Amino acid sequence: MTEGYRGVWVFVEQKKGEFLPVGLQLLGKGREIADRLGEKLSALVLGRDVKDKAKALIGYGADEVLVVDQPKLEDYQTDLYAHVVTELVQKERPSVFLLGATYNGRDLAPTVAGRLETGLSSDCTRLEIDEEGRLVQVVPAFRGMASILCPDRRPQMATIRPGVFRLPAPDESRTGTVREVQVDLETVENRAELVELYLQEPEGKPLEEAETVVAGGAGIGDLEGWKLIEDLAQVLGAAVGATRPPLDEGWAREDQMIGQSGKTVRPDLYIGIGISGETQHVVGIEDAKVVVAINNDPGAPIFKVADYGIVADYRKVVPVLIERFKKLKNTG
Amino acid sequence: MQILVLVKAVPDPERANEITLDPETGTVKREGIPLVINPLDRNAVEEALRLKEEKGGTVAALSMGPPAAEGPLREALALGVDRAVLLSDRAMAGADTLATARVLAAGARYLGDFDLILCGAESFDGGTAQVGPELAQFLGLPHASYVTSAREKGGLLEVEAKVEDGRKKLQVRLPALLTVSRELNRPRGLSFSGIVRARGKKVEVLSLADLGMDPSRAGVAGSPTIIGDISTPTTTRSGEIIKGDPEEVVDVLVKKLTEAGVV
């Protein structure tokens, strides 16, 4: 079932005609994979009036941009997008197919994989090619990392969260082709129709760009404790991050989650408080320059991935830290 | 309305830190940790019960898992579902999301026709968010993911679902499958009368043979993906523990951070 499948594809999602950064990040990674395989890298773009912009993707590493430009494809709609992508995959037979793990990407990928009955891994944090030319899809799993392979079916599909791979610097001198492809959507039923999109401006500086991050976990215990996290962040001019439990408790917002199913941060300083240090979280802080952990459990795995650890009740330490940083700020 | 709700048995999230990976076998070690209904599947159960109370009809709960997954299904019965079915067979073990979805599709077809299928958007342990949409493909149903509100109106579902920095409103034709978010509702707790009522009900257990399904389509055999190496992440950080009372540790820490030039 793997015969005749060649090439690396990246789905580059657009919103209101603008390409999402995750698609460009995946072109950077896709380029490495395609070079390793000695195969072509193609960017796949669906949208309305996107033809002219598609050329820019060549600078990010694509050898070829496949464009399906139709009014009906202006916004993501499952049935229409899945139909187009499935048909093109069946016709063009890529061996590797990467998609950004946005809400839409996480909807499109399993829909296409389900229709093609092929393998899909989600939220990969590393992608490699093994000696047999297969895509090794590395995902964090319960204090470890698991490599997933899709040996007998093609394409080998994977989703990757925004920010996991770095944005490549565009190279205007790169050459490649833009190929517009026609797909007939007349007979495709749009059974889950988009009626309206409500978008808000995101709050504050994005977590993934912050120079300092203060993050809290389950060990914070209550909303009052969470206030301490926010106070420390404020005095440091830091962004607030979280693991899953503070989200479930309603202390933190979803866009504050760090880790495999959240954001990857690259600050100079990361302070993790009341965080045990599960792999799913830790993969999101690997690129921090200095990691500080405060936790009352000396056995918490976070201490193994920290530069400095403080084994203590955060309610005793954090207020002292806040006072000290306030003083530093006033004298500094 | 005939509603099917998918219930995954997952290790109790409260005890998640006890779960480890076995590097030898590549399987999840979770011995001794009780199985519960996957948190987002509880939202799915709640929505199913709410719709039944509003529109009438029945709610069936379906799961694929080991015999121990009966526990969470009993809980679903106690919450108020009318029927609970467990697909359990040695040949179903080790399934990836595609093989899981294929078996669940066979189970859903076996149970009859449904107007609506509900499940959590993602599981607490796997977290892939793939089984719902994949199942919808096997059943040929439209679907919406990460749903935050759903209302039936004139044979259509008016649905709100998550996107980055906002929401989208969709109109979904029935029958359909929805994967649901935490924001959808507040799941009810177990009641004493519910527990008593559930005592009289049984969890039906079905095998691959009952479903008339070829074992090569299920479990490890039917899974396109395999797990290769398992590794434990290595770190290059020093892991220096700073000791003392709060004033002392803060002194040392602030000095170190200042020296490193990060504050």
Image: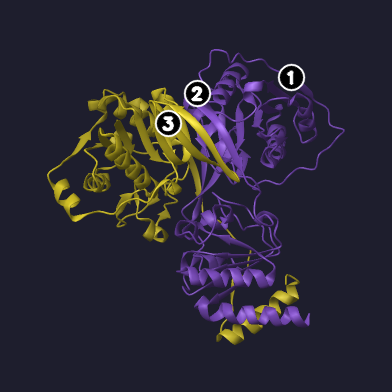
User: Relative to the observer, which residue lies in front, A38 or A89?
Assistant: A89
Between the residue at mark 3 and the residue at mark 1, the CA separation in whole angstroms equals 38 Å
Q: Reading the chain from its start, which is encountered first: label 1 or label 2?
A: 2
Going by the numbered disc 2, the residue's amino acid type is Leu
> At 31% across and 28% down in the image, what residue appears?
B108
Q: Position of residue A224 (x, y in %)?
A: 49, 72
* Chain letter belonging to callout 1: A
State the SS at label 3.
strand
Can you name the residue that lies furthest to the front here?
B154
User: In what quadrant of the picture does the N terminus of chain B appear?
Assistant: top left
Asked whether the residues under marks 3 and 1 belong to the same chain, the reply is no
> In this orientation, does residue B96 appear?
no
Q: Where does label 2 land, which residue?
A: A116
Do dots 1 and 2 share one subunit?
Answer: yes
* Distance from Cα at disc 1 to Cα at disc 2: 24 Å
Q: Secondary structure at mark 2?
A: helix
| The disc label shown at residue B157, or none | 3
- Tell me the number on the disc at residue A179: 1
- Of all chains in the rendering, the one displayed in purple is A
Q: Indicate the amino acid at tag 3.
A: Leu
Q: What chain does mark 3 sit on?
A: B
